[in-house]
Amino acid sequence: MTETTTRWAAIDSPEELALRLSAKGYLAGEGLVAAAFLALAMRRPLFLEGAPGVGKTDFARKVALALDARHIRLQCHAGIDATQALYDWNFPKQILALRAEVGAGSLYTEDYLVRRPILRSVEGPPTVLLIDEIDRADDEFEALLLEFLEDYRVSIPELPGLHERECEAKPLVVLTSNRTREVGDALKRRCLYHWIDHPTPAQEEEILRLRVPLIAPALAERIAAGMKRVRGHRELSRPPGVAESLDLATALVARGAQALTPGGLDAAISTVVKQHDDHDLIRDGLLGEGP
Amino acid sequence: MTLLEFVGELRAAGLWPGTDRVANAARALAALPGKPYWALRTTLCSQPSDIEIFNAIWYAEGPQGEAELPSVVVVGAEAGPATGGRGEAVEAGESRSTARAGARGVDDLGVRDLRGLTPQELAEIDRLIALLAPVARQRRVMRRVPWRTGRIDAARTLRHLLASGGEPARILRSRKALRPRRLLLLIDVSASMAEYVDPYLRLAHAAMVAGPDTTEVFTIGTRWTRLSPLLRNRNADAALRSAGLVRADWGRGTTLGPALRDFLRRWGTRTSVRGAIIVIFSDGLEAGRAEVLPRQVARLRRLGHRLVWVNPLLGMAGYKPLGAMKMSLPFVSAHLPGHDLASLRGFAASLREAAR
């Protein structure tokens, strides 16, 4: 991260972006790279959906690294509003100023402005702004984002002359959603859309070997194949994602395992089973005894 | 084939990108000429179901150059795969033939009878609408609203402070806002429930009209089918008629457990289920393995706020729950009878309690 760069790194092709991403430890599928390249080229926000644990959040972080940009994350939750996302005013400071010198100057100036993630992202160096789990915010919050996503501009009505913040290096905005709620079309219309699938076994094996460097090749292959089997199981209530297979691999490697044994898997099973009902299905699937 | 022709094909198949999306697609094609598939997919699609339609059109027009219409069926209701009984194998092939014939809802999955509603039945629906109004069931949310008591609202207090020249004349406060709790109705439409399905559908329609934003209705039998969009019509006759036309598995056998499991896999993480008051209308007679249903019921209970089971058999003298039903009962917050209008009204009134 270099705070001094004021321009976006020039990326000429999706292949170059993919190369830069893999250098930072993120193996993106062809579609995801193409979508991110378009987002950069067209200056459009990128809306990512997919099953939990396929690497939506990590993607934003790795894109920032790959492009030498600043990474700012805005985690959405129920009840999030403008004062947490755009900007707020420093009330204690305003009250102190008011009590100290009555009638002197405006209390709504830069001195009292508290910058929140979205305002910060339009000021300063190139930024990858991650608006994480937008589906968890109330639907009213989406309307708040519309002006920003369209023009990369934040207006602050309290500042003299309807101050509008516009930036030279427009941020790359990545929105993620787990589909706990259907996100409104007004917001989606302004974005490029990409659905991230679970990786193929070959991709997953490569991801494991890249992210867990000490892993034995046979173990990586075994986990990737097992995950494919597990995810295909219809009775499963929650299929594990790539995040889970990475955790499993890390746990097994930390225990010095070279291969997937029933004993070793049992010791590390807490990394992949997040619903008690799924325990047997996942265990059998990973060990290759399931259907 | 030009972009506009391609978009025309998409529209014919039910994917309807606006002109701004099409303009975006043109820009994306220019920015990424080497990968037209991805350029178009990221700009024209906005949800997983769009991608299915997109792929169908794209590959139909692809290298093979087949001239026939792609296999996409456009129906008003969303449905899961059949989980048992007949109909398992139809999924892939069926959609192609229905799309071409334009006949929707008249295959072997069966159709409800379409008689109109009597004035008494319409009046009953009106009464139920009043009972099911979502304002009657509130929950607290994170968002804060001005109120007499509660946490100090710094922003508003400061604005008043300015007006009074810096004297803290009035401290303004806020509390958490109230929102209606969601209602999720799951109606068992298997053969053993046949005589009760009509009153339950009317109740579902009443709930839908009372709170269209906070109500979801599904039928469950050998598979799940979402009826919510169809029941939103305020005209009871038209709404129930269109619901009856949906290719749900009316009057088939029951594999409630597997159907619920599939439902939870698709909808379990959505807000329609989480924190909602979940109501199952069923006699709990399960044809499949008995141990599947209780597990799904337990999961529903954990996901929702309250789980109410309305059972038409409960009103009968000497009824004792057996098998899957008996095993599910420990997870149910309230087990209510539902064999006549009085008991349904009682159920509607009890939702007020259930919201707390």
Image (cartoon, rainbow, N blue to C red):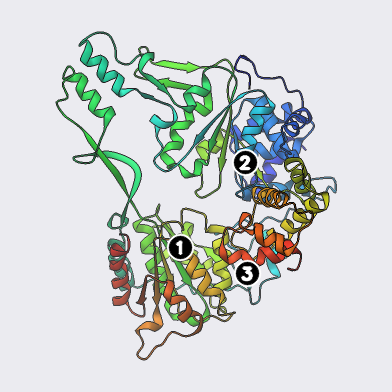
Direction from residue B293 to residue A157 in the image, left or right: left
* Label of residue B302 in the image: 1
Report which quarter residue B185 is drawn in.
Answer: bottom left
Q: Secondary structure at mark 1?
A: helix
For marks 1 and 3, the one nearer the N-term is 3
In the displayed structure, B342 sits above or below A282; it is: below
| Residue that sits furthest to the front in the current view | A256
- Crowd class of label 2 (few under 14; some 14 to 19; many from 20; radius 10 Å): many
Which percent across, then down, holds residue B97?
A: 71, 63
In the displayed structure, B166 sits above or below B35; it is: above
Report which quarter residue B90 is drawn in.
Answer: bottom right
**Residue drawn 35% across and 17% down?**
A112
* Label of residue A56 in the image: 2
- Crowd class of label 3 (few under 14; some 14 to 19; many from 20; radius 10 Å): many
Quadrant (top left, top right, bottom left, bottom right) of the C terminus of chain B: bottom left
In the picture of the structure, the residue carrying the numbered disc 3 is B82
Residue at mark 3: chain: B
Q: Secondary structure at mark 2?
A: helix
Question: Which amino acid type is marked by label 3?
Answer: Ala
| CA separation in Å, label 3 and label 2 | 31 Å
Q: Are marks 2 and 1 on the same chain?
A: no
**Residue drawn 28% across and 64% down?**
B353
Direction from residue B44 to residue A177 in the image, left or right: left
